[in-house]
Amino acid sequence: MKTHKNPTLIKTRFALNFLRAMRRLNRSGPSDACQRFHAIRAAATASMASAVGPRRAWSRAVLKKNRTRRAKNPRRDVSGLGQEDDLRVLVPGGQGLDFCQLLSESAHYIECLRAQVQVMTDLLDRYSA
């Protein structure tokens, strides 16, 4: 799938993917609040990665993780690591990148997270009115 640099297109694709995922969750999702929170967060992350496509390392890492459905790993303690290592842990797919690529991927990931928050806020405002 080709990745477009147009942020409006990415937001639209994210919104469509996210709404589709939310409909699936409403039909057969978990009823426990904590499990539901995690399912919604996973749906949002997967929707954003799908909207961006496979050209970015972080989106490939998220898509691969969703395909393989690994068992949940406990969070690693990141204290004592350098700032670069902290960033590698925070950005999906950051482990295999050199520092310049890591910064580029981090900037793109942050832009996508901002867009994700904006779209989800807009959806909430629209459907809660």
Image: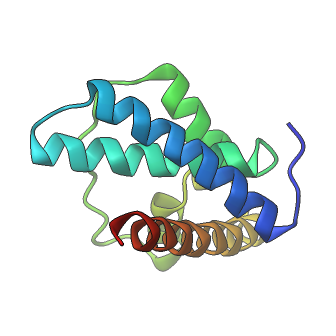
Q: Position of residue 76 (x, y in %)?
A: 28, 52
Camera-side residue of 73 and 66: 66
Identity of the residue drawn at 60% across and 41% down: 61
Camera-side residue of 30 and 68: 30
Camera-side residue of 54 and 5: 5
Identity of the residue drawn at 87% across and 65% down: 5
Identity of the residue drawn at 37% across and 51% down: 41
Q: Which quarter of the rendered picture does the C terminus lie within?
A: bottom left
Identity of the residue drawn at 86% across and 67% down: 6
Colouring style: rainbow
Furthest residue toward left: 32
- 86 vs 76, left or right, is right
| Above or below 51: residue 23 | above
Q: Which quarter of the rendered picture does the N terminus lie within?
A: top right
Task: For residue 93, say whether it is visible.
Answer: no
Residue 97, quarter of picture: bottom right
Q: Position of residue 14 (x, y in %)?
A: 63, 53
| Above or below 109: residue 64 | above
Camera-side residue of 95 and 117: 117
| Above or below 75: residue 101 | below
Task: For residue 83, say whether it is visible.
Answer: yes
Q: Position of residue 125 (x, y in %)?
A: 42, 74
Across the whole image, how many numbered discs are drawn on residues? 0
